[in-house]
Image: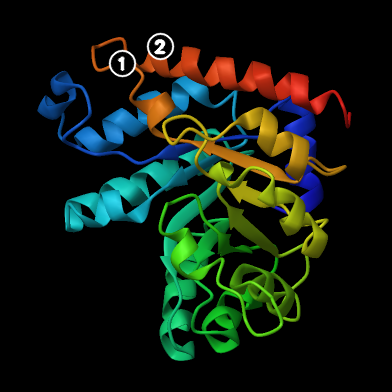
Amino acid sequence: MNKQQLFENIKRKQSFLCVGLDTDIKKIPEHLLKDEDPVFAFNKAIIDATADLCIAYKPNLAFYESLGVKGWIAFEKTVNYIKKNYPDQFIIADAKRGDIGNTSEMYARSFFDELNIDSVTVAPYMGEDSVKPFLIYPEKWVILLALTSNKGSHDFQLTEDANGERLFEKVLKKSQEWANDEQMMYVVGATQGKMFTDIRKYAPNHFLLVPGVGAQGGSLEEVCKYGMNDMCGLIVNSSRGIIYADKTENFADAARKAAKEVQEEMAVQLQSIL
């Protein structure tokens, strides 16, 4: 999926919502545990309930890897289900990979060749040769960690060099030598607020994947005020606030209601650019 196609989906659905499939088997409704594949059963119900309200799904690999082979099977079934039934959805493998070149090449092969996923999150700490293997696939996306939503982001990402340049700014500037805004996005946490202004100084046209709205307390209005560009430029993720809105047999209906509330707020925010 290219940048224009992504924007067309945003306009058509009046939404830039990404539903994070952080599916914890210890948190899903108990009645699903009787299913042969409870994680996939949960994901399928969430997807069917929210697909018309969002433009992306983001399974977080940690939740699947923690279950060993069964988790990987559930992950692959989830990806295949989305691709078959909702082909307009942008799929993000939230894997935060990034290793020496030949290892990154294997990670890229896994997500892009084997699973044919649209994008993968990548950590930039090891530099160019750890990222480049993901960039050889046309119309596949690298989503590079830039300024994250967690408290510990301040430990390194905001540190300054002798010239006053912060580490996240160095990441933004250097990485644009590797790919343009048709193949690279950045992770910027919703909790960063006005810092989106600084992000947009260096990456005015890139799409930003924005976690942290909802359970983590990030403000959608603030994200849009400081981060939106003329192609929206935002994919805002909500995980726990949607998928765990209810733990009864009505969990999918509750997830839809929660997603609808976010989508309606997004439709209002989009009025300024559409």
Q: Are marks 2 and 1 in contact (CB under 8 Å)?
A: yes
Secondary structure of the residue carrying tag 1 is: loop
Residue 11 found in image quarter: top right
Q: Nearer the viewer, mark 2 or mark 1?
A: 1
Residue indicated by mark 1? 246
Mark yes or no: residue 72 visible: no
Residue at (48% x, 29% y) in the render: 214
Mark yes or no: residue 220 visible: yes
Pinpoint residue 257: horizontal percent, then vertical percent. 48, 12
Residue 68 found in image quarter: bottom left
- The residue nearer to you, when weighing 25 against 218, is 218
Secondary structure of the residue carrying tag 2 is: helix
The total of numbered circles placed on residues is: 2
Q: Is residue 234 left or right of residue 43?
A: right
Outermost residue to the left: 34
Residue at (65% x, 85% y) in the render: 162
- Label 1 amino acid? Asp
The crowd level at tag 2 (other Cα within 10 Å; few <14, some 14-19, many 20+) is some
Pinpoint residue 135: horizontal percent, then vertical percent. 63, 75
Is the residue 121 above or below the residue 215 in the image? below
Residue at (58% x, 21% y) in the render: 262
- Label 2 amino acid? Asp
Residue at (52% x, 51% y) in the render: 92
Pinpoint residue 237: horizontal percent, then vertical percent. 53, 39
CA distance for labels 2 and 1:
9 Å
Residue indicated by mark 2? 253
Q: Is residue 257 left or right of residue 164?
A: left
Q: Is residue 117 left or right of residue 163?
A: left
Is the residue 178 above or below the residue 68 in the image? below
Q: Quadrant of the C terminus?
A: top right
